[in-house]
Amino acid sequence: MSILDRFRLDGQVAIITGAGRGIGAASARALAEAGADIAITARSVDQLDEVAAVAKSFGRRALVVPGDVNDLDFLAEFAQKATDELGRIDIVVNNAGGSPPAALTDITAKSFEAAFHFNVTTALALTQACIPQLVANRGNVVNISSMAGRTAARGLTQYGVAKAAMTHLTRYLATDLNPKVRVNAIAVGSTATSALETILTVPEIHDAMVAATPLRFIAEPEDIALGVLYLSSSAARYMTGKIIEIDGGTESSTFELPIADF
């Protein structure tokens, strides 16, 4: 087997959340190009259909299952449908997540718990639903976390705390699923996705974020998808419970809300 063959995913099935756009869509395309059939979910059918069309152009099967990942019953149904229609699950990419910026005094118990549910509980629930298949196929899980989980910036408390929890969830899942299932995560830096599209159109904010990034550019979703492909493949067979930082070399936040001192 050649080195490049280690990155192939022929005969495998990947299940990806938040796959209609951004990092999720780029990851689905990358895994399909590497040979995997894909099961994808998000709320927008049109976006999912576009991703599925790309996968099919590579000769892959693509199952589109629109829905809301915040509904844990839906996640169980998604996993079962992927198993029934594609025959197996080898790779789980927990990508869906996020939380809008908010000043500390604007955070409520409801909004805080919603951020935790969206970013952490959903990843746990989908992974649990896929355990029988992952164990049987010696599969792996890739969680999309964030540098916000290890840095601190005003306005990002809900998001950052949730991503910190997701990072540590990765380590616990890996521990519990050893030795048959690998679980790793990617701590993502500033990436040109829909979550940042509004602020990135403001030249001053865009330039400040670029200047705060040691490599002096904002990542494209494909930059993160390459990390997903690596962790999903046998090239990373000796990695589990680890967090890869794909963040342009940043050691502090590149963006925070202009919130005044108390």
Image (cartoon, grey):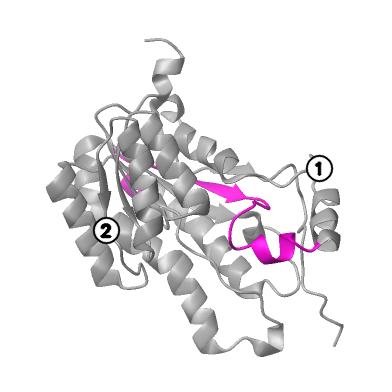
Look at discs 2 and 1 and give the one toward the viewer: 2
Near-viewer residue (84 or 132): 84
From what the image shows, is residue 36 above or below residue 187?
above
Q: CA distance from mark 2 to mark 1?
A: 38 Å
Residue for badge 1? 216
Query: Which of the two discs, 2 and 1, labels the residue nearer the N terminus?
Result: 2
Q: Is residue 178 visible?
A: no
Q: Quadrant of the N terminus?
A: top left
Residue 22 is inside the magenta segment = no
Instruction: Estimate the x, y position of residue 195 in percent, counting from the top left.
Output: 60, 63
Q: Which residues are magenta?
A: 175-202
Q: Can residue 184 be found in the magenta stretch?
A: yes
Q: Which mark is residue 65?
A: 2
The residue tagged with tag 1: helix, strand or loop?
A: loop
Element type at marker 2?
loop
Q: Position of residue 55 (x, y in %)?
A: 35, 38
Q: Residues within 10 Å of mark 1 (few under 14, many from 20)?
A: some
- Near mark 2 (Cα within 10 A), the count class, few <14, some 14-19 or many ≥20, is many
Q: Is residue 30 above or below residue 10?
A: below
